[in-house]
Amino acid sequence: MKFKMHFLDDKIQCLICPRKCILKEGQRGFCHVRINLNGDLVLETYGKNTGLSIDPIEKKPLYHFYPASKVLSFGTFGCNMGCLFCQNFHMSKYRGDISISQKASPEDIVRIAKQYNCKSVAFTYNDPDVFFEYAIDTAKLCRQEGIKTVAVTAGYINEEPRKEFYKYMDAANIDLKGFSEEFYRKNCLAHLEPVLNTIKYTVNETPCHIELTTLLIEGENDSETMLQNECEWIINNIGDNIPLHFSGFYPRYKFNDRKSTTLQTLLKAREIALNFGIKYVYTGNFETPETSSTYCSNCGKIIIKRNGYNITEYNISGNKCSFCGKECDGEF
């Protein structure tokens, strides 16, 4: 994988993500899990994870990708984002001994997924861009066994690695953390444009099923202007049929003194998105059947009724609305 790194005299430049860290011998990248070891770029978390969990696919969140199916989820340590509000900081910001990780080879993960009849395997909890090789090797084996693959990611990845990564992903939920460069720079120590490029590429140039999530933090990324800009960009660049999730923030990490997002804030964002013409808009981290259910874009009736992650009503035949026959966007 030549696109992974570039040699600079006695240093290595990592090319996986836009940070393009330049590493001396023994030095780690921003993600903390890639290291220049004897002149090679080594992923220290390959084959190591923070535990396996069987989840409903709705927890990723993916609402239009084989609803009610089981997904085997895992992640590792490290992250290439610097989000001050990180909800999984105990894994993504961990700087201790990674030998405490649970060991599981790609073969082990596929075997366990088959054993528990999981429809898919999800690379989640921390960003799979960080454990790029581990995720891809696992995804290749999954594909051979008819198991779907899911990435839960911030989308902060360079062009060539992005092409390689999404060749093996069947679905992804991409975090669009806020719609301004200032927000990304100040609160994520990153930039917005690479994320937008990933979203456009995956939606417009791959068969990968994509859903978006914006974690709303009151006073930071929930202004009417910012939400309108986000929705306008979605409509103009990737269309009106991408499922969009607005999730509630809980105090974590450097934002531990902030207040939790209210349901009212999420409902306001949902209303803005619907008014812009986005067909499928959801609220997350609250059990609200009305705003977590899927409605037919033609007749307006509920075709998937949800309470939290549980599906209580299912009115889709094949991939069509049982009431009017209109095709629903997604994989069912």
Image (cartoon, helix red, strand yellow):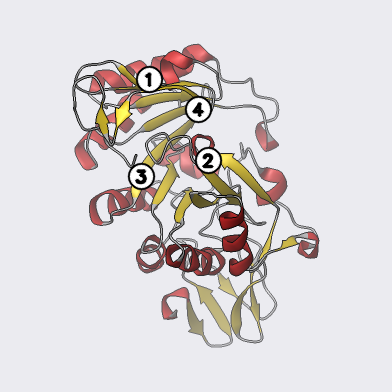
Q: Which residue is mark 4?
A: 247
Q: Earlier in the sequence, mark 4 or mark 2?
A: 2
* Mark 2 neighbour density, 10 Å: few (under 14) some (14–19) many (20 or more): few
Q: Earlier in the sequence, mark 3 or mark 4?
A: 3
Distance in Å between CA atoms under marks 1 and 2 = 25 Å
Q: Earlier in the sequence, mark 3 or mark 1?
A: 3
Question: Disc 2 marks which amino acid?
Answer: Lys
Residue 108, quarter of picture: bottom right
* Mark 3 neighbour density, 10 Å: few (under 14) some (14–19) many (20 or more): many
Q: Nearer the viewer, mark 4 or mark 2?
A: 4
Q: Which residue is mark 2?
A: 186
Distance in Å between CA atoms under marks 4 and 2 = 20 Å
Q: Which residue is mark 1?
A: 270
Q: Which residue is mark 3?
A: 210
Decide: is 148 above or below 86: below
Q: Quadrant of the N terminus?
A: bottom left
Q: Earlier in the sequence, mark 2 or mark 3?
A: 2
The reply, left or right, for residue 12 in relation to residue 294 is: right
**Identity of the residue drawn at 44% across and 49% down:** 191
Cβ atoms at labels 4 and 2 below 8 Å apart: no
**Residue found at the very far top of the displayed protein:** 264
Frontmost residue, 207 versus 173 = 207
Q: Nearer the viewer, mark 1 or mark 2?
A: 1
